[in-house]
Amino acid sequence: MEVQTNKITGNAYQGGNQAILLAEKEKGNYKSNEWLTFVQARTAHKKLVNAKGCGVHLRTFTRESRRNKKTDKMSDFSRPVNFVVFNLDLLEEVKR
């Protein structure tokens, strides 16, 4: 199995994300095993060409607070962090 990685960080995607991205790679006939978020692509001066992203989630959680409308009390909760990533084959250099 080919390891799917983030182009910028070099980190391999973990767990189910590996399977999701490998399936998306095969479905899209992509040659690259590297993926980027939209923000990472813009930072790297690349633009998306006919791009369809693939959703992945991180093991980390973000903590948030919300006010309960009925009790007017604040409560903390965690939610997973999700990203949409794009295969490197879908990107091209931005002409400056």
Image (cartoon, rainbow, N blue to C red):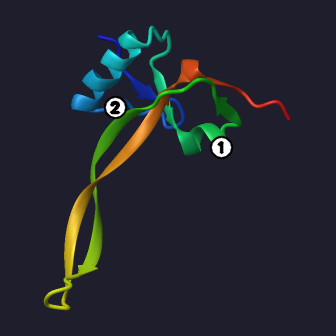
Q: Nearer the viewer, residue 12 or 66?
A: 66
Q: Residue 59 at x, y = what percent?
A: 25, 47
Q: Characterize the local packing of mark 2: few (<14), some (14-19) or many (20 or more) Cα atoms within 10 angstroms.
A: many
Q: Residues within 10 Å of mark 1 (few under 14, many from 20)?
A: few
Q: Which of the 4 image quadrants contains residue 57?
A: top left
Name above or below for residue 9 compared with residue 80. above
From this view, report whether residue 76 is shown above or below residue 26: below
What residue lies at 56% left-to-right and 18% top-to-bottom? Answer: 89
* Residue pictured at 22% horizontal, 64% vertical: 78
How many angstroms separate mark 1 from mark 2 (CA)? 20 Å
Q: Is residue 48 above or below residue 22?
A: below
Q: Secondary structure at mark 1?
A: helix
Res 85 quadrant in image: top left
On screen, residue 28 versus residue 21, left or right, reads right
**Residue 25: which numbered mark, if any?**
none
Count of number-bearing discs: 2
Vertical relation: 40 (above or below) 29: below
Place of residue 90 in the rendered image (x, y in percent of width and height, measured from the top left):
57, 22
Q: Residue flagged by tag 2: what amino acid is it? A: Tyr
Q: For the view shown, which residue lies furthest in the left direction?
A: 71
Q: Which residue is mark 2?
A: 13
Dot 1 corresponds to which residue?
43
Residue 60 x, y percent position in the rendering: 28, 52
Task: Please give the name of the residue rendered at 66% of the width and 37% of the height, measured from the top-left corner.
Answer: 44
Earlier residue among tags 1 and 2: 2
Residue 53 appears in the rendering: yes
Left or right, 21 with reference to 42: left
Q: Amino acid at mark 1?
A: Thr
Percent coordinates x, y for residue 10 in the rendering: 47, 32
Task: Please name the residue shown 82% across and 30% down the image.
Answer: 95
The quarter of the picture where the C terminus appears is top right
